[in-house]
Image (spheres, rainbow, N blue to C red):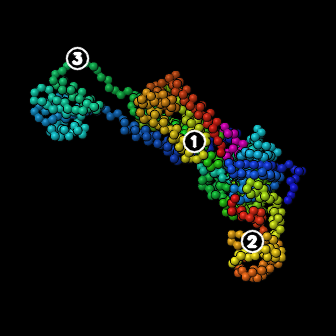
Amino acid sequence: MLEPSTAFPAALSCRGLVKRYGDVVAVDGLDLEVRPGECFGLLGPNGAGKTTTIEILEGLNRPDAGEVSVLGEAWGRGRDRALRQRLGIQLQETKLNDKLSVEETVTLFRSFYARGPAPLEVIRQVSLEEKRGAWVVKLSGGQRQRLSVACALVNQPEVLFLDEPTTGLDPQSRRQLWELIAGFRRGGGTVLLTTHYMDEAEKLCDRVAIVDHGKVIALGTPAELIALLGADHVVEFAVEGEPDTARLAALPGAGQVRREAAGWLLSLRTPHVTIPALLAELERQRLPLLSLTTHHATLEDVFMSLTGRTLRDGA
Amino acid sequence: MNALRRSALWQLSRARMVMFLREPEAVFWVFVFPILLALALGIAFRNQGPQRSAVGVEQGPGAAAVERALAASPDLAVRVLAPDAARVALRRGAIAVLVRPAPAGPPVLIYDPTRPETRLAHLATVDALERAAGRTDPLAVRDDTRVRPGGRYIDFLLPGLIGLNLLGTGMWGIGFPIATARQQKLLKRMIATPMRKTDYLLAFLFARIFWLLLEVGALLLFGWLAFHVVVRGSWLAFTLVVLVGALAFSALGLLVASRAQTIEAVSGWMNAAMLPMWLLSGTFFPADRFPGAVQPLVQALPLTAANNALRAIMNEGAGLAATGWPLLLLAAWAAASFFAALKLFRWE
Ligand SMILES: Nc1ncnc2c1ncn2[C@@H]1O[C@H](COP(=O)(O)OP(=O)(O)OP(=O)(O)O)[C@@H](O)[C@H]1O
Ligand SMILES: [Mg+2]
């Protein structure tokens, strides 16, 4: 894991963050540090505390304990409006006004900020020029999501917060949004985003924090996190009967063995050695093979090996 | 102009105005419905000229003379009926009084004295019979029966409809969008920007004043074109009452929506706030008809104050001085509701 750099002040940081809702501890002593110009991902299952954390950083939610610093400032010291001039925020579930057009919506948001590009310029950035006169109610889900991001970009923010920006989008819309984020970063902006999608985090994020039950359980670049597995390939297979997992783990080049809903997962470093050995071992245990597939290890596998659950299992 | 167009307050107010005009339901209830109501009630209760009372004369000797005597009265419609038919007509209310000629002496009048229209018919019948018998009037009064302007039902109704409309748009036009925006996390999104919260709330008031011009203008114009209803008193007083009234009801709408998390909740609260005013504030009939015990409540309601003031100005030609008290009451409602709303308001 990389040590937090002391040479640059962090764009965002929080320390010992705690937030409780009655008996539920939504955020449980969470530390984060996002460097200027970096794209940082919060990854975790439903209810992990991602939205609560990001909204505390955005100054929309008050923590029960802990310290927050945003661009070197703290919330609630009388400088909130000045700070908001420098942030771009997209919330997980905002519904914009149905009966305003795309252009009217962007112009409205633009009017809250002292500086920023012209509304049409922002509309072009999110490729909604053709829809500029259309009412929000007439937009598709992906177009609404892009409009919501446009509203976060109207002030050319220094820090962009995106809470599940691509949930529910088709692959093409997701890719468009990824490009938008990449473009924003080329301009020197810092991004904090949350997502359920591993490929998204691997593609977009310089560093990722895996959050579970309100705590950071792993932190690093996607490559570093995958290296934690000690293996960069994963075999998924299903057999009739119960394999002897100790013997499987002892195969040459094999890592962890885990049970999954549809069968078994074996992480491994050298497919060309381990897979023939695995087949021979299953033969020896007299377990007919029903299916076998392999893939490169992903953050999903990291999450599973850390928690024993998949990201979509929920808390 | 460009600086204005870029200002948040202008953009927020403009957005409010156009969003309202883009809701067909809102436009119907605010503009079309009150006019339809005024039209329907104005026609149903229009003055139809003097009415005649129906009286019957039972067949028999002397019936013809009685019929002649009654027919001379402009207030009576007379029929001669067989005894059986006469009884049925009386029971059904087809005739108010039955006159039974007597072989000797004056006729007998059969009627039910508990109904006002029946007593009226009785008086007119007695009068007609006495005249026919040769009575002369000891005092010859002269009548002036022209209808006074401002005295028709539509004259009473239209100011009430304006008041009711101020209440309705104030509540629905402000409470509804705020509760919706809160439910859809739009309020939260708004305060994630550097927008001034006061700008957001002020925009509602500005948009409100804009609709006010449209809705009051539409009702006044309709009243003038269709029924020749006019504002007889001070236009300044009229404008002030409408403006302060609109602010009072808007503040009430803001108060009702200050915490509501859902559309259902805000609808419930709004109906709870509006019901007493619909019932008690004298929109469709005078509020003085309620018993004295509830009058303090009736008179304290903002809609009562607005209705009374508008009627005084439009029908009785009242000026600013005469509307001081209702204006004060409305201003008090506006201020109290607004400060309570600011205290209670939740952005999420
Ligand atoms: N306003 C609230 N009142 C009560 N409990 C809350 C509230 N907001 C969040 N929680 C609880 O806090 C926990 C964390 O919620 P949070 O929204 O931060 O999760 P998340 O990681 O964003 O999940 P998702 O991926 O589903 O968006 C959950 O258990 C949730 O039920
Ligand atoms: Mg969330």
Badge 2: few (under 14), some or many (20 or more) residues near its Cα, within 10 Å? many
Badge 3: few (under 14), some or many (20 or more) residues near its Cα, within 10 Å? few
| Residue type pointed to by label 3 | Pro
CA–CA distance between discs 2 and 1? Answer: 56 Å
Q: Earlier in the sequence, mark 1 or mark 3?
A: 3
CA–CA distance between discs 1 and 3? Answer: 66 Å
Which of B104/A255 is in front? A255
Tell me if residue B262 is in the magenta stretch: no
Q: What is the span of residues highlighted in magenta in the rendered image?
A: B188-199
Residues marked 3 and 2, same chain = no
Residues marked 2 and 1, same chain = no
Residue A286 screen position, x and y as percent: 73, 82
Which of A233/B180 is in front? A233
Q: Can you tell which of label 1 and label 3 is closer to the viewer?
A: 1
Label 3 beta carbon within 8 A of ligand 1: no
Can the viewer see residue A309? Answer: yes
- Residue under circle 1? B175
Q: Can you tell which of label 2 and label 1 is closer to the viewer?
A: 2
- Residue under circle 2? A265
Q: Residue at x 42, y 30 (%)?
A: B290
Q: State which quadrant residue A43 falls in.
A: bottom right
- Residue under circle 3? B138
